[in-house]
Image (cartoon, helix red, strand yellow):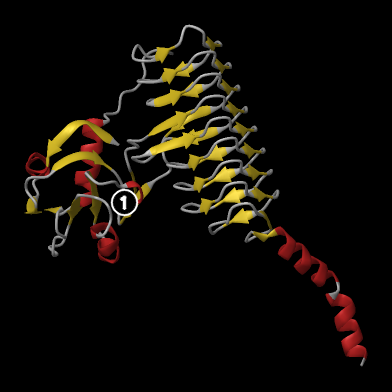
Amino acid sequence: MKFSSPIPVKEIAEKIGAQLIGDAGLMVTGINEVHQVQKGDLTFVDVRKYFDKSLKSEASVIIINEKVKCPKGKALLLCDNPFEAYNGLVLEHRPFQPLSQAVSDTAEIHPTAIIEPNVVIGHHVKVGANTYIQANVTIAEHVTIGNDVVIQSGSAIGTDAFYFKRTEEGYLPWRSGGRVIIEDRVRIGAGCTINKGVSGDTVIGEGTKIDCQVHIGHDVVVGKNCLFAAQVGIGGNTIIGDDVILYGQAGISHNVKIGNKVMVHAKSGVSKNLEEGKAYFGYPANEARTMYKELAALRHLPTFFANYYEK
């Protein structure tokens, strides 16, 4: 999530009551969880085993709960509860605003767009030219929809990220400060859900077609001209290349990368990165040719063992 204008790190330190260590002249341009950070961003860490990852990330400012050596060119904000400080900053810059009407006054809808009855359109939504949104669709806050997009009945776009911090008191929700961006000529089937990013953007690339009852998690980036069949599920922070085909009920884990022109067969489970241009099958998914050879070999095992024990 980018700020509307850069904020001095000194101002943030004062706001959250943190001790400033390192470069006090930094300007903070955005706030992101560690998987999405870029130079100029602020992030947080409160578990020692993740300190190294956060300190070596692109983040310029890290909210932290233990005094450590500050990397050159960065700043640390030392406080007791980094998550609370981080979440509070997100809420300040992306405050919760419940809807009081079906279409927010802040929504920008192109005059050629077709919006059927019972569609809910949240705050700061943009809908492009010749886009067709069918009845009973919900478009939540901070969603940008391009031109010539079709969204079929019952889909929910921009739902909160399924992202929680585990504490002794239970699971605490993060404020979803990210967006959903749907590019031109995307088609989304009925009953789909697309989560907004935790702090970055969930992106559906130009020309991609999505069947009914597909779920796409937070911060997922889908390339151009992909094809997803019904009941596909994609975990958060996954990156999918161009021209990828996911057949029915394929399950994609979080934090994986799928290369261009990959095909994943139905009911397969993807738990690791997939190289481009190949077909995959099974759970865990492996190259389809390899998996089919293994299945063929398995069919011969009963005969093999029967002959072995007869000897």
Which residue occupies the foreground of this view, 151 or 242?
242
Q: In the picture, residue 140 is in which quadrant? A: top left
**As displayed, is residue 5 above or below residue 123?**
below
Which residue occupies the foreground of this view, 221 or 51?
221
Q: Amino acid at mark 1?
A: Val
Residue at the farthest bottom position: 311
**As displayed, is residue 61 above or below residue 149?**
below
Counting every numbered tag in the picture gives: 1
Look at 56% across and 19% down and name the residue there.
Answer: 148
Left or right: 257 in relation to 45: right
Residue 139 location in percent, x, y?
A: 46, 23
Left or right: 98 in relation to 75: right
Look at 30% across and 36% down and name the residue there.
Answer: 1
* Residue at mark 1: 34
Q: Residues within 10 Å of mark 1 (few under 14, many from 20)?
A: many
Residue 140 visible in the shown view = no
The quadrant in which the C terminus is found is: bottom right
Left or right: 293 in relation to 223: right
Query: Helix, strand or loop at disc 1?
Result: helix
Which residue occupies the foreground of this view, 273 or 307?
273
Residue 37 location in percent, x, y?
A: 30, 47
Which residue occupies the foreground of this view, 101 or 262?
262
Look at 55% across and 36% down and name the residue there.
Answer: 224
Residue 5 visible in the shown view = yes
Residue 196 location in percent, x, y?
A: 42, 35
Residue 243 location in percent, x, y?
A: 61, 41
**As displayed, is residue 185 above or below residue 100?**
below
**As displayed, is residue 249 above or below residue 50?**
above
